[in-house]
Image: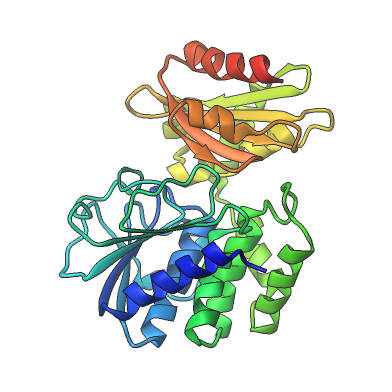
Amino acid sequence: MEPIDGVAMLDQVLTEIGRRERFVLTSHDRADGDAVGSSLACQEILRRMGKRAEVVLRHGVPRVYQHLPFAATVIQSERVNGNYDAAILLECDSIQRTRLHGLENQFLINIDHHKSGRPFAQVNWIDPKAVATAEMVYRLAKQAGVKISPEIATCLYTAVLTDTGAFMFEGTSEHTFELARELVLAGADPARTARHIYFGHSTAKMRLLGAALSALQREGPLAWIWVTQEQMERVGAKEEDCEGLVNYALAIGDVEVAAFFRELPDGRFRVSLRSKGKLDVSKIAEEFGGGGHTCASGAAVDGPLHAAVESILGRIRAIQ
C-alpha cells in the first residue's frame, strides 16, 4: 500500500489539476521509454478528465516508440509555446533537463520516481518506491476515476517494460508483475510491445554497436565501451541509436558494472552506467551532476576520452 504522504501528494496533484484547464507535459531530453510512455499516457488521462493537454519533447519521440498510441501528437520543439495553466514534468529532476525554453514562469508539477529526484516545482510528487513513473501515472488515473483504455495501457506497459530493463533490474518484484498484469488485462499486448522495442533497431545502430564492442575494455568485474562523434557520423547514427548499447557490456557473465561513453559534439562525454545490483551506480552519477536508478544511471563529464574514462572508473574503483 502506498504511504500516507504519497497518497496526500497524489491528492495534491489532482487538486492542482482540477483547478486548471490547459497543460503542457514534458520530460528529460533524449526521452526513454518511461519518459515517452508516461507522458503520452498522462496526456490522454488529462484529456479524459476534460482537460486540454499537449506533450512537448525537445528531441521528439525516438523511433522505437513511434508506434505508441498518441505518439504522432507529440510536438518536437526547443520552446514551449502556448498559454498553458501548468506544466507537468515527468521523471525529470529539473527544468534544465528538459532542454526546453519557456517553462520558467509556468506553474510546475513534478512527478518522478528516481532516487535522485529533486523538489524543484511548486508541487513535487516523488516516490522512489515506484517501479517507474508510469506506475505513478497509473495511480493518478485510478484515483481520478479514469478508465485505463488499451491505448493508455500500452503506453504505460511500454514504460514499465523498459524502465525495469525488461523486468531484469533490481527492484523488480511481485508488485511489478501485478502492475504489468493489470495493464495487460486493460489491453496492452506484451509480445507486440517487446517486438517494437527490442527488434526495431536501425542498421546504423548495429554498425555502431560493432564499433563499440570492438573497443571493449575489461578490468575484473568492470567493463566499458565508447563511441566517438566521428564513428556516429560515419555510420549515420542518431543520438537514440546509443540507447541500450551499455547493456551489451553488462551482458558478460562475470561483469558486475558497465559504462558506455558517448562523445558529444562539444567534446564532452555522456556516460551510461549499468549494474547487476552489487553497486549503486546512481551514487556515482550524482557525483557528476547526473542521477537515475540503483542499476541504471547516467551523467555527463568533460573530455577527452581518456580523462572521461578515468574520472568515472576512478570513482567506481573507489567504492567497489
The part of the image, by quadrant, that contains residue 149 is: bottom right
Give how far across and how far down residue 31 sits, in percent: 45, 52
In the image, farthest residue toward the right:
253
Above or below, 177 against 236 in this view is below
On screen, residue 152 versus residue 199, left or right, reads: left
Residue 43 shows up from this direction: yes
- Looking at the picture, how far across and down is residue 270, in whole percent? 46, 31
Q: What residue lies at 36% left-to-right and 22% top-to-bottom?
A: 267
Residue placed most toward the observer, 30 or 229: 30
124 is higher (above) or lower (below) than 1:
above
Which quadrant would residue 289 be assigned to in this image?
top left
Quarter of the view holding residue 22: bottom left
Q: Residue at x 38, y 48 (%)?
A: 29
Left or right position of 168 against 192: right
Residue 216: percent from the left, percent from the top? 67, 22
Where the C terminus falls, by quadrant? top right
Looking at the image, residue 72 lies above or below residue 97:
below
Question: Looking at the image, which residue is at 73% across and 47% down?
Answer: 170
Left or right? Give the position of 214 relative to 118. Answer: right
Task: Quadrant for the N terminus, please.
Answer: bottom right
Q: Position of residue 178 (x, y in %)?
A: 74, 71
Q: Is residue 205 above or below residue 134?
A: above
How many numbered callouts?
Answer: 0
* Residue 64 in view (yes/no): no
Q: How is the image coloured?
A: rainbow
